[in-house]
Structures are given as structure tokens and as C-alpha cells.
Image (cartoon, grey):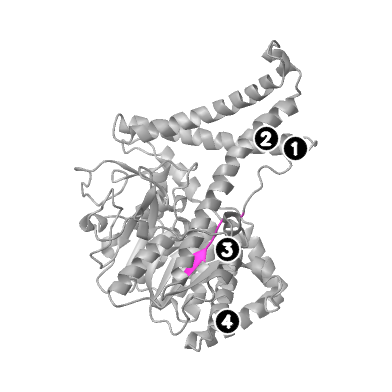
């Protein structure tokens, strides 16, 4: 298991970002896709006939799952989905990816899977169902919302109690990787099913034996991969996993797993490792498609200096932060109760202390700012009494908004910039890489082939929130956006490379259908 390079190996590091290639802000911005294409167009491999391909499905909750379903529908329609040999999934991508794998193992057609999955998405609120299970928990364990969510997935008609060992020899998808984040080292934790003896399962610090992986439920892997910070507590490996009676705790420390998108929201690093393994087996991939769903940026700090009353937006910001802190603090305390003074106590104490001190630090910061603005001899309470309620709330809200901006915008921009570096590295290799982005409509503003109706559909999908519930109408919009974006991205790649493969004619026909259908809806 040690033959595969680790995440900290210098050979695995992302290419550095130079001023000539674009600033960090540019690479992480909504225009990043266009910049990426211009940077690598001259060196990329050509797209030709596709016999073996890789597919990466990014994180993003139900929003991502529905969008990816549309992308996969296009791949099925043009005959590319049966050629998928490598699948890497993260968070919401793991939900739809696991469902598709189970349908393959059960010899179901894609149309049957698509109907069942769309029905399940639009009628299933994972958090609500998990909460109901939590209230009825009677297994003697401390209640756990993420374990309850895993049970919801395990009882669903699209994933069920399927385990990694149920994939038989000869299964068409040779490399299956469901990605989570391991908190001790901050590295990716990969639950990987592959024939390669070089592949690491788990990661370098916490290797997982193949006989143990065979007992792992896909439902638990999906729960770990989609364990959103703030909404769920960590899923503990191996104690929180249903291993079908196998005791994997002997000689193993508890490891805390959370959403795979914390480290790599697109699952690119796992695809890259799989591509390397395929090349070493003299069976290289012809194409890698990355279906990328990311949350639109929110300007938490805009209007902060406005003279208008800040109370409505302030209340919202403080409420969101209070919920986030309260949930995480409760989770940390519950974890301490569960583990006692185990190896994970240090992590739990760090989380608990940090989340308790965060609002305290914000209050002290506000007090110190006010104190320095007046003479030292003044009584602080008297100074505070001179401020209106709105002014004090505004001061606290700015601190709350700053925390939210760091969590939601700044950190994720940094992660995305690293992902762009990895994609750029992909494009310099033999594998043709095509990104399908939920934000592609921004690049189509001046494209006469894209009708206003198609752009509006994609724009509505981009504006939707990342959740674990969706209405039927939202699922319909997201699936349609995935189809539009996938067809256009693949068609543009084929045209730019002057590809004559058979699937290009199918893409052209599908694109004509999508344009006509969009015009009719409008």
C-alpha cells in the first residue's frame, strides 16, 4: 500500500501559480474556467475516439447530485458513460455516484436509474429523516446525526446496504474512489476499490486493508464524504462504520472524517492517481470529464459601512453564526463524552475551545476597539452607553460577517486555486480533460449558439443553495443545467480539436434538441 505517492510528496504538489498565468484571485474567480482554457490550450492533448474515460463528480449537496445527473445523462446519450473506468466522487457527487454504481451492479439501465434517483432526490430530506432517527435512537451509543444520515442512505432505494465487496470481478468501473477528509493530518481519506496493488486505501497515516474495505457500506462512505462542517459532527473511522460484524478497531486509533470538499472539492487528486495507475498498466485513459459544482460567492461584507439600518442583515449574519457555533460546540462536547480521553480528545478540545473562544474574542475585539477610541480614564460602560443599539450590533456583525467570509469565500477560493493548478497539470499530459462547470453560462454571454432560455436555466441552477433537500422543480432545473453545460463543453472540446469520433454527431444532435426545447419553454 505504500507504493503510491502521498499527498505531501513533492511530486504530487500542484503547479505553482505565476503572475503570467493569473493571480490567485483570478484563478479562484468565476472567470477562472475561461482563464484556464486560455492558459493550456496550446499544450493540451487532442480529443479523439474514447474507449476509456475518467469521471470526477464534485461536492455541493443535492445541488451537485442533480447537476451531475444531467451531465451523466449526456454522457449516456452520446455513448460515453459505458466507457467510464475511473470514478472519483466528493460529497454530493458521492450520493449520485454511489447510486449509479449500485444500479450498474444490479444490471439496471441508466434511464431506470435516472428516474429512481430523481424521484428520491425530490422526495427525501436527509437531514429531517436523520433527525427523526436520532430521536428514536436506542442502540446504546451517543446520538449521532451523521450516523443517522448514513442509515438514511442505507435504507434508500438508490444506495441501500450495498458494500464495496459486492462489486464483482469484471465490474466495468475499475477504480472507484469516494473521498473524505481526515482531520488529524488534513489529508484526503480515500475509500478506493481498485485492482491495482499500488493504490493506497484510506491514506498514508491510516491505511485500510482490502478485506476491511470489502465490508464497508457505500452508505457510510457517502455519509463521510458528505459530512458538511457545521451541519454534522465527524464520522469516526472505524467505530461509526457498519462493517458487517467485522471488528476493525483492534490496533486502530479513531480517525475523524468529514466532507471531502474541505481538501479537494472536485476529487481531482484521486483521478490523477488513478490515471497514473492506468498508464502504468498500459491502459491509459482517453478523456477525463470533471463535473464541477461550486457555491456562488456571497459578499458578506458589502454594505457594512452603509448608513442605512443594518439590523435585518445583521440579525441574519449573527443567527447563521450562532447556529454554526452552537451545533459545532454540541458536537465537540458529545465527541468528548463518547471518546473520553482517547486519541481524539485533543482534536475535540481544540474544536470546542476554538468555537467557545470565537464569539468571546469577537466581543473582546469590539470592546478593545471602543476602549482605544476614548480617553483611558473614561469608564468603558459609560462609553458603551453612548452608542445606539444599532451601532453596537453593527460592530459585532462585522466580526461575525468576517468569520463567515473566511469560512465561505476566502478559504474556498484558496482550495479552488489549487484545484485549477491540478487541472492545468492534467492538460499538459496525454489525457484530454474537459471541465463541465455549473457557472459555464458566464462564458456564453456572447455565444450566439446559446439561447437566452438556456442561459437563464443555468443561471437559476447556479443561484440555488447547497442543501440536502430539493423540490421537484429545483431538481428539474439542475438536471437541465447539467445537460446543457455538459453538451456544450464536450461539443466545444470536440470542435476545437477537430474531433471526428462518432459521439460528436450525437452531441450535435443533442445540442439542437436542447436549443429547441429551451426556446419552447421560453
First in sequence, mark 4 or 2: give its number.
Answer: 2
Res 305 label? 1
Q: CA distance from mark 4 to mark 2?
A: 47 Å
496 relative to 254, above or below = below
The image quadrant that residue 89 belongs to is bottom left
First in sequence, mark 2 or 3: give its number.
Answer: 3
Residue for badge 2: 315
Residue for badge 3: 20
Give the image location of residue 166, x and y in percent: 27, 64
Q: Badges 1 and 3: C-beta atoms under 8 Å apart?
A: no
First in sequence, mark 2 or 1: give its number.
Answer: 1
Q: Badges 1 and 4: C-beta atoms under 8 Å apart?
A: no
Quadrant housing the C terminus: bottom right
Res 183 label? none
Q: Which residues are magenta?
A: 289-296
Residue for badge 4: 510
Q: Nearer the viewer, mark 1 or mark 3?
A: 3
Q: Nearer the viewer, mark 1 or mark 4?
A: 1
Q: CA distance from mark 4 to mark 3?
A: 38 Å
Give the image location of residue 207, x and y in percent: 26, 52
For the residue labelled by badge 4, is the local secondary structure a helix, a strand or a loop?
A: helix
Q: CA distance from mark 2 to mark 1?
A: 16 Å
Question: Which of the pair 283/339 is nearer the observer?
Answer: 283
Amino acid at each position: 500500500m505504500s507504493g503510491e505517492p502521498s499527498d505531501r510528496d513533492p511530486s504530487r504538489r500542484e503547479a505553482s501559480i505565476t503572475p503570467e498565468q493569473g493571480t490567485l484571485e483570478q484563478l479562484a474567480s468565476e472567470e477562472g474556467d475561461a482563464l484556464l482554457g486560455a492558459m493550456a490550450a496550446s499544450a493540451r492533448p487532442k480529443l479523439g475516439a474514447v474507449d476509456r474515460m475518467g469521471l470526477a463528480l464534485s461536492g455541493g449537496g443535492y445541488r451537485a447530485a442533480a447537476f451531475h445527473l444531467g451531465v451523466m445523462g449526456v454522457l449516456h446519450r452520446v455513448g460515453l458513460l459505458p466507457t467510464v473506468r475511473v470514478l472519483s466522487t466528493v460529497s454530493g457527487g458521492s450520493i449520485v455516484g454511489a447510486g449509479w454504481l449500485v444500479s450498474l451492479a444490479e444490471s439496471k439501465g441508466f434511464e431506470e436509474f435516472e428516474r429512481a434517483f430523481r424521484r428520491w432526490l425530490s422526495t427525501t430530506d436527509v437531514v429531517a429523516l436523520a433527525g427523526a432517527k436520532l430521536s428514536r435512537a436506542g442502540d446504546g451509543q451517543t446520538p449521532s446525526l451523521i450516523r443517522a444520515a448514513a442509515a438514511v442512505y442505507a435504507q434508500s432505494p438508490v444506495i441501500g446496504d450495498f458494500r464495496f465487496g459486492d462489486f464483482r470481478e469484471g465490474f466495468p468501473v475499475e477504480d472507484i474512489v469516494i473521498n473524505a477528509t481526515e482531520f488529524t493530518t488534513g489529508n484526503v481519506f480515500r475509500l478506493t476499490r481498485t485492482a491495482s496493488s499500488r493504490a493506497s486505501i484510506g491514506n498514508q497515516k491510516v491505511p485500510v486493508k482490502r478485506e476491511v474495505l470489502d465490508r464497508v457500506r457505500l452508505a457510510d462512505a457517502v455519509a463521510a464524504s458528505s459530512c458538511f462542517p457545521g451541519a454534522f459532527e465527524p464520522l469516526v473511522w472505524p467505530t461509526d462504520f457498519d462493517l458487517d460484524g467485522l471488528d476493525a478497531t483492534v490496533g486502530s486509533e479513531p480517525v475523524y472524517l468529514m466532507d471531502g470538499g474541505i481538501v479537494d472539492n472536485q476529487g481531482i487528486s484521486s483521478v490523477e492517481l488513478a490515471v497514473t495507475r492506468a498508464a502504468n498498466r498500459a491502459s491509459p485513459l482517453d478523456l477525463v470529464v470533471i463535473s464541477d459544482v461550486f457555491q456562488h460567492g456571497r459578499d458578506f461584507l458589502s454594505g457594512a459601512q452603509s448608513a442605512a439600518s443594518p439590523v435585518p442583515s445583521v440579525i441574519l449574519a449573527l443567527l447563521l453564526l450562532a447556529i454554526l457555533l452552537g451545533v459545532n460546540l454540541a458536537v465537540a462536547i458529545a465527541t468528548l463524552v463518547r471518546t473520553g480521553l482517547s486519541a481524539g480528545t485533543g482534536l475535540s478540545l481544540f474544536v470546542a475551545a476554538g468555537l467557545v473562544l470565537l464569539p468571546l474574542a469577537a466581543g473582546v475585539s469590539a470592546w478593545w476597539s471602543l476602549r482605544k477610541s476614548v480617553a483611558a480614564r473614561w469608564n468603558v460602560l459609560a462609553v458603551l452607553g453612548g452608542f445606539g443599539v444599532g451601532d453596537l450590533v453593527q460592530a459585532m456583525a462585522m466580526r461575525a460577517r468576517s468569520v463567515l467570509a473566511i469560512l465561505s469565500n476566502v478559504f474556498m477560493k484558496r482550495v479552488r486555486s489549487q484545484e485549477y493548478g491540478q487541472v492545468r497539470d492534467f492538460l499538459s499530459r496525454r489525457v484530454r480533460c474537459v471541465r463541465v462547470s455549473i457557472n459555464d453560462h458566464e462564458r456564453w454571454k456572447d455565444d450566439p449558439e446559446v439561447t437566452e432560455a438556456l442561459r437563464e436555466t443555468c443561471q437559476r441552477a447556479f443561484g440555488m443553495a447547497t442543501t440536502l433537500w430539493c423540490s421537484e422543480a429545483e431538481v428539474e432545473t439542475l438536471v437541465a443545467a447539467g445537460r446543457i453545460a455538459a453538451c456544450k463543453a464536450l461539443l466545444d472540446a470536440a470542435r476545437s480539436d477537430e474531433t471526428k469520433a462518432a459521439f460528436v454527431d450525437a452531441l450535435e444532435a443533442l445540442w439542437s434538441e436542447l436549443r429547441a426545447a429551451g426556446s419552447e419553454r421560453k
